[in-house]
Amino acid sequence: MKRTITFLLLSTFFTVTLNAKVTADTPADPAIKVTPKAPVFTDAERQTELAKRRAAVAAKMAPNSMLIMWAAAPRNYAGDVDFYYRQENNHYYLTNLKQTNSALVMVKEGSTVKEYLFLPKRNPQFETWNGHMYSGEEATKISGIKTIIDASELAAFQNAMTKKEAFTSKGGVSIATNPESVYLLLPESDRDNEGIAEFSREEAFKTKLPIVENAPLYKVVNARPIFDELRLIKSPYEIKLMQHAVDISVEAHMRSQAMAGRAEWEYQVQAEVEYTFRRRNADYWGYPSIVGCGPNATTLHYEESQSPVKKGQLMLMDVGAEYDHYTADVTRTFPVNGKFTKEQAEIYQIVYDAQEAAAAAAAKPGATMQDLGKAAQNVIMDGLLKLGLITAKDPRQVRIWYMHGLGHWIGMNVHDVGSYSPTLKPGMMFTNEPGIYIREDALDYLPDTPENKAFIAKVKPAFEKYKTIGVRIEDDLLITDTGVVWMTKALPRSIADIEAFMAKASKELPYTAGGATHQNLFTAAASY
């Protein structure tokens, strides 16, 4: 009995002491911001959102037409191992279902639109090995689509379409197979290699549709322009999901900046990023993480993360979480030791000012993405000329050090769909990501001409001063009725703010190269 009492007293003492220490060690206003809780939607809210999307698609379909959409096929990694399954974006946009071997059919007859979902029947043996499959009731609860047909009958439906024969399921559901137009997701051209790979099943089905007297019985229409236009404008529902993906990404950036000065290798910094993604229940990364130190920061898509982290160098991190099919895209460049050198700061400030100029242009009525790009390029051109890295205000010279565009749409793809010609409208989301990259070999590959020899001779002193410095700053922006919202505003961006953040944050996240100590922030977010 005495031993029991003693044990309980000791347990209470250590618990109180530990809690007191954690409370004392956890700052009242931490620099590292914990991701807010994920948005929660009711079944009714989700069904209403998806119904609006399907209605918007139907409104753009021709009279007497049909849309057929297949789920994404699993993709093989090697042998009998597949990649993580990710549903085809447009299918998910209309259904929110992650089920393989399913298909959505929408039939428009006059003002009436009928929706059918082909869904695999639950298979206990499959579920034992691979996990839960949707029941018809669950699929309806998620998507709001009420008419469910066993996916085992999908081949019969497709066969009926190729013969233009009536189709009636075993459960008595009839689908009219006499539309004038059939909408499919198809490659945009013979040179659309990505579309050819992703929509091969649709292309194969298209070739099987009947032709009589050299004329097709159906007019086949590519459905992608419909989705490209609709997905360009995000709904309030989508904006909440996007903001959560951004918030997860911001926390990952913050934690990485806090420990980078004590990391030995780039992959250790990347591990902190992807640990945060999983901890916050992100689906995955939206694209392979880019974590490049020193000269690696001058490679736009550096993905190896195999080089050492060295104090005195800049680290460029371009990382974004995907949450519920929506991906953020965020880049920060910061000094490993927490302090910019004079040369690093000079390059960084030009990029920062270019980003500010682009955002200011976005706030002007009638602005286009091209206008934003010109605003940023003009600032970079002036800055490079001042530093002696170019000899004239010549866009061709600028492209040596700034070789990509200003930004792109974001959403269900990191480089999301949609035309770049329209003026900016509320609901559009895009990246603002100017950069300057002084690659060590940049001058070595210029054509051997008198003009280039003269150029190299003039810029050589500046090049030697700034070489191996790579800077990109990337934020996610949202157009609203009142202007522009920086969705990534919580992540420090100016030189002063980054240096102040790193000084404070490094004290909040104890770390050794052998492994981080996550006690403080883990406790702070334990109820997440």
Image: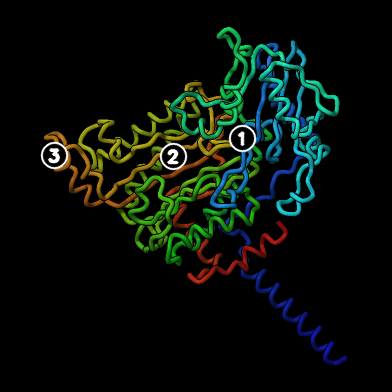
Q: Residue at x 47, y 48 (%)?
A: 318
Residue, far left:
450
Note whether 234 is above or below 114 in the view shown: below
Q: In the image, 313: left or right of 170? A: left
Q: Callout 1: few (<14), some (14-19), or many (20+) C-alpha neighbours within 10 Å?
A: some
Looking at the rendered structure, the kind of residue marked 3 is: Lys
Q: In the image, 174: left or right of 293? A: right
The N terminus sits in image quarter: bottom right
Q: Earlier in the sequence, mark 1 or mark 3?
A: 1
Residues at badges 1 and 3 in contact (C-beta under 8 Å)? Answer: no
Please tell me the numbered disc located at residue 89: 1
Return the x and y of residue 398 as percentages of the image width and height.
29, 36
Q: State how far apart marks 3 and 2 are (Cα).
A: 31 Å
**Front of the two marks 1 and 3:** 1
Please tell me the numbered disc located at residue 433: 2
Q: Quadrant of residue 326?
A: top right
**Front of the two marks 1 and 2:** 1
Looking at the rendered structure, the kind of residue marked 2 is: Glu
The C terminus sits in image quarter: bottom right
Foreground of the two, 428 or 79 = 79
Q: Quadrant of residue 218?
A: top right
